[in-house]
Image (cartoon, rainbow, N blue to C red):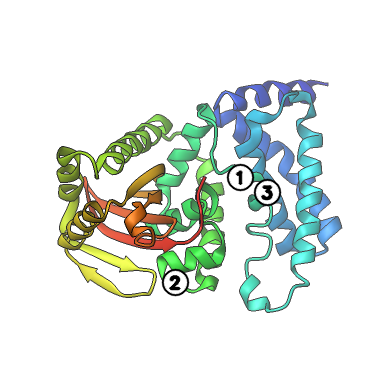
Amino acid sequence: MELLADTYKNVIAAQRGDAVAWNFLFQQHYPWMYAAALHICGNSPAAKDAVQETFVAAYLKLHQLKEASAFAGWLKTSLIRCCHRSMNASLLPAAEEFSSVGSSCLWDDEISKKLDRNELQTRLYHILACLPDILQTVLMLRYFSDFNSYEEIAAILCIPIGTVRSRLNQAKQKMISHWLDSSADNDKAFKQAQEWNHVYHIYFGNVYTSLHYREKLINHFDKNLHLVFTSGKTAFGRKLIEQEIEEDILHGSGFGSLQVMSSGNISIIEAHNINSPGHSNRCPDSTVFVLHRNGNRTTRLHLHHSGKKLF
């Protein structure tokens, strides 16, 4: 009974953002979950992957658990589902493309693209900011973007699909490691991300209607900005961006709705494009911008145009 009481107390605390309480739950439930996963999966690597995936999902969805007393059963249901999906995935062809089987199976169902703003979210922002830029980028595109297929991520970043999978798996492993560090300043990373989100909403949202914000955005890009296009071609200099904006204004094109996600030195902006009746084919349905900052300036920008409709 005392153990159940401790679990209940720590679930409530973890839902409020208490990292120490979450670590207690992790340590308390990992042994029986691993044993159960071994019984289903029959091999150690797959079992560990299934347990890790379950904890990833549980952490990100913990605020949705209405009854703290149901925590263990909730974990067990998720674990069984992930074990079976991992086993089914192992039967797929082209094994080299699935070298990280189970590393993202449950994430696809469990990670919400738009997390509610709550105390757990501040923890997530800190964890994201702790990851290397190349891991943050694939993670953000996969789980917070509408361009989240492996093929789209590979196209946007100009990397092989296998590399996308590998980086996602590395990101997951590092996130779990960071969760065990409860000494981090969560609020700082969250506030920084929200500040960049706000800045880009203003800059991109007003770039075609306000000279002031257009100049702000252009000056935010480094003079030697490194541009990377979906085709794999590259170019240098912010002048190209300035010219493209001027052409858009000339032809009556602009942005409609915007979605912005920031973490650390990276921001992903998804823009719905609007064309004038006279130039209806100038811009595709949407554009994805992946910005990499050094300090307060963007030094690298990935551009991806798509016929895919957003929102």
Q: Earlier in the sequence, mark 3 or mark 2?
A: 3
Q: Residue at x 66, y 25 (%)?
A: 10
**What element does badge 3 sit on?**
helix
Q: Residues within 10 Å of mark 3 (few under 14, many from 20)?
A: few
Kindly identify which residue carries mark 3: 109
**Mark 2 or mark 1, which has the lower sequence index?**
1
Q: Amino acid at mark 2?
A: Ile
Q: CA distance from mark 1 to mark 3?
A: 6 Å
- Residue drawn at x 43%, y 35% is 184
Q: Is residue 200 visible?
A: yes
Measuring 50% from the left and 70% from the top, which residue is drawn there? 163
Q: Which mark is residue 159?
A: 2
The local secondary structure at tag 1 comes to loop
Q: Can residue 290 be spotted in the picture?
A: no
Give the crowd class for mark 1: few <14, some 14-19, many >=20 residues within 10 Å: some
Amino acid tagged 3: Asp
From this viewpoint, which residue is outermost toward the right? 39
Q: Which residue is mark 1?
A: 111
Nearest to the observer: residue 147 or residue 55:
147
